[in-house]
Image (cartoon, rainbow, N blue to C red):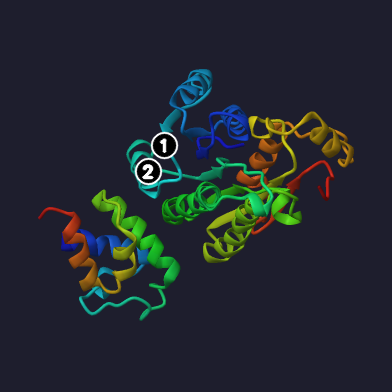
Amino acid sequence: MLDKKYALITGASRGIGAATARIFAKKGANLILVARNKEALQKIQDELSLLTQVHIYACDLQKSTEIKKLFGFIRTHTKELDILIHAAGMMYSAMQMMSREQIIKELFDTNFISAYELSRYASKMMLRQKSGSIVFISSIMALEGAKAHSAYSASKSALKGLMHSLAKEYAPHIRINCVAPGVVQTDMIASLSKEEKERIIAATPLARLAMPEEVAQTLLFLSSDMSSFITSQTIRVDGGLCSF
Amino acid sequence: MENTLKTAFADALGIEKEMITDELTYNTIDEWDSVAHMTLIGEIEDVFDIMLDTDDIINMSSFTKAKEIISKYVKQ
């Protein structure tokens, strides 16, 4: 399905990013995996190298200079890029009155500015090939809002605006979409109490949390030619959950 | 360098090399619009194996300007 396509996946050391790397490898994609934790990346590289070509690059996506270096690495090692999955993200939970400005800035650097910079460099490569698919991981909080998540919701909502604009800017060559997961069973929700998880499950018609692989399957769909006429869309993977 | 740059312009914009003169300016021909500009930037970066700064991408408004900018990155 993704035979020999070059896919850049950020946040690839765990959660949705790692699940996506595993599924893409099985579907034949060559991988460029990015995360801060080099050891965790190496473990995934060891695991997937038998299936496909796997390049790893450890960097901090909060720094634009490091994103530029990442694309220098890609230009040197693969010369091609067909897919960008931006799964790296930062969660922040605090009531507005308790939210610290410095953390809000870090949140926007990680969740939004990095997406802006990654898509800027990726689209240059994709436009030359006259094809490509970019998918940002947004959140249902971007669509619905959530108590104690105003900054997080806003940073993920910004991705949606970016996606709609770039989808127009780079059409017809590059398709750009968002996936908006509900609450996914990853490290990111480690801070949620048992009661909070139970409340979310009770409000979810499918009566459970999402598994990272279920989000990854949607990313596979949006990255492949199966979605060749889909752009500028946000696909919810939320089990029917519509409000927190 | 100038001939390589001319080839990059011709390939990226899909025009004949003869059309590429010092007077060729961004947005004065149909083939060099904003999207084609991004393709051109990608082609130049690939051909010269460089990564252009955003200011240089914005300022590359003519073939003459492109020569001036690329010369900063490429040793003659």
> Could you tell me if residue A228 is visible in this image?
no
Residue tagged by mark 2? A66
On residue A212, which mark appears?
Answer: none
> Could you tell me if residue A84 is visible in this image?
yes
Q: Which of A176 and A152 lies nearest the eye of the viewer?
A: A152
Q: CA distance from mark 2 to mark 1?
A: 6 Å
Q: Which of B22 and A215 lies nearest the eye of the viewer?
A: A215
Q: Is B29 placed above or below A85 here?
A: below
Which residue is depicted at the point 30% across and 58% down? Answer: B53
Which residue is depicted at the point 65% across and 41% down? Answer: A219
| Earlier sequence position, callout 2 versus callout 1 | 1
Q: Residue B25 in the image: x percent, y percent?
A: 30, 78
The chain under label 2 reads A
Decide if residue A198 is on the left or right side of residue A116.
right
The chain under label 1 reads A
Q: Residue furthest front?
A: A97
Mark 2 vs mark 1: tell me if same chain. Answer: yes
- Decide: few, some or many residues near mark 1? Use Cα within 10 Å; few <14, some 14-19, many ≥20: some
Provide the secondary structure element on which disc 1 rests. Answer: loop
Decide if residue A185 is on the left or right side of residue A6.
right
Which residue is depicted at the point 48% across and 18% down? Answer: A46
Decide if residue A115 is on the left or right side of residue A80.
right
Q: Identify the amino acid type marked 2.
A: Glu
Q: Residue A174 in the image: x percent, y percent?
A: 54, 56
Q: Residue A162: which quarter of the image? A: bottom right
Q: Identify the amino acid type marked 1.
A: Cys
Residue tagged by mark 1? A59
Quadrant for the N terminus of chain A, please.
top right
